[in-house]
Image (cartoon, grey):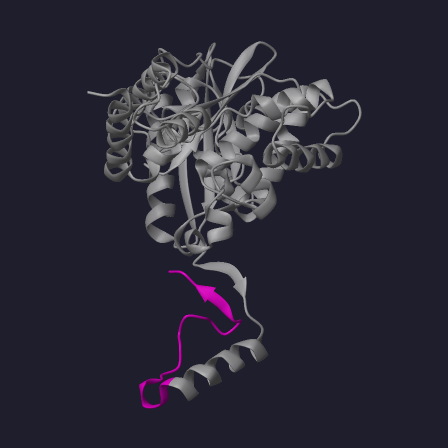
Amino acid sequence: MKKSTKILTVILSALLLIASFGAAAVGALSYVNVNKLAASLEMISQTSETTKVSVKTVGEDLDELSAVVEDVKTKLSVGEDVAQENDVCIANDYWIRDTSAVSDAYKSGSSEGLDDRQKETLKMASDLLDKLIKKNMTSYDKEKAVYEWLTNNINSELGMLTVIPTSSESSDEPFGVLKYKSAVCVGYATTFRLLMQMLGMECMVVHDTSLTHSWDLVKLDDEWYHVDCYFDSDCAYRHFNLDDAAFEQDHDWNKDFFPKAKGKKYSYALQNAVQLDDICSLPELVMDKVKANESVFACILKDIGKDDEALAVYMVNRIEEIINSGSDEISFDHYWAEGEGQYTLCMFVTRISDTIEDVIDEETLETAEEALEKAFGDLYSPSDLYDDDHVLRVG
């Protein structure tokens, strides 16, 4: 078989992979340097049958593309976890990409070698840090400032938001997150990592074993902590600076590959824990925190015996049962953190909203309805998509 025929065969195989795996395959193949391959094919197409093509050049390109196809096959193994940080596909659509070129450019003060998209990302990220970072901030202060900005200013791409092309197309990378203020979990994680690394802090993007979610590990004072900005866009500080024991309550990941998170010093819940001397005062404490609109709080129980321990477990489980079954406005969950001679009960309250703050003014809404009624005539009926305040209902 001629070399040119072999090349076309391999390319056909790559196209079949794209057809089989869709956008995920396109994402993986985007790393391929196709310029050399295209040049070789053009050289073949422009060469007559009597002219010799460089077998060495074509052979090298053939080997390169063959290796890429095999790499794509490996990376696109459905349902299989991979022991790596970058080049991981989440939910079959979103790719965790390396962002070190941008963070390195920030630290070096030179954008040489960046493409236009990376340069724009660098500009947006730099401007953001100029606003957030103040003089004499500690590493923790900087991390907290970035975390709070992401959880308060970026919209989670769920439901109707995923149909907005301008945001969805880039919602898994810092460029789209910073430009359109909308993100999927991968976008939150890679943007947080980028900003941390720009500030000179060690940070990694972690993915779960089912390849459906991603978050971050950040290093503070030589200890690692888990941070999930995506989850905390609904409940502030719920997954902010947790150790492995606390985080594995609702996350699963490759613990052999990613570093162990043992830090407790900068856990938001533990930092704000209060001493609880009477277990029966726990319900009052919880209700006081709920009324104060606090979402994360903790209490410390020292030197408790087995009877007190059993009562504490019963009490918090009953609180959780009562709130979650009796309220459609808040939900409650908790975990226990064990320390030297004490237990710390960390509690979390999530406010549930049945609306998205997507308000249409009355005049605009009436204009839209008039256009619909005029076009559809007898088929038209009033809408219940919006409430009396013209806020879009989602529940």
- Say whether residue 96 is left or right of residue 273: left
Above or below — where is 351 with respect to 84?
A: below
Q: Which of 233 and 305 is in front in this view?
A: 233
Task: Name the quadrant containing residue 95.
Answer: top left
The answer to which of 211 and 166 lies nearer the viewer is 166
- Residue farthest to the bottom, as pictured: 378
Q: In which quarter of the image is the C terminus?
A: bottom left
Determine which quarter of the picture holds residue 71: top left
Residue 300, percent across and down?
50, 23
Magenta-drawn stretch, dominant element (helix, strand or loop)? loop
| Residue depicted at 36% across the width and 30% down the height | 89
Query: Seen in the image, is 233 located left or right of residue 68?
Result: right
Residue lying at 46% horizontally and 71% vertically, measured from the top left: 387
**Residue 184 % position (x, y):** 45, 41
Look at the image and tell me whether residue 91 can be seen.
Answer: no
Say which of 10 and 164 sits in front. 10
Q: Can residue 163 be seen in this view?
A: yes
Q: Among all residues in the image, which is located at the extreme front?
A: 50
- Please provide the residue range marked out in magenta: 376-395
Q: In this view, does 4 lie to the left or right of 221?
A: left
Q: For residue 388: magenta?
A: yes
From the top left corner, tell me how far across and down residue 133 is, in percent: 73, 30
Residue at image position (40%, 19%) is: 245
Q: Position of residue 260 (x, y in %)?
A: 44, 12
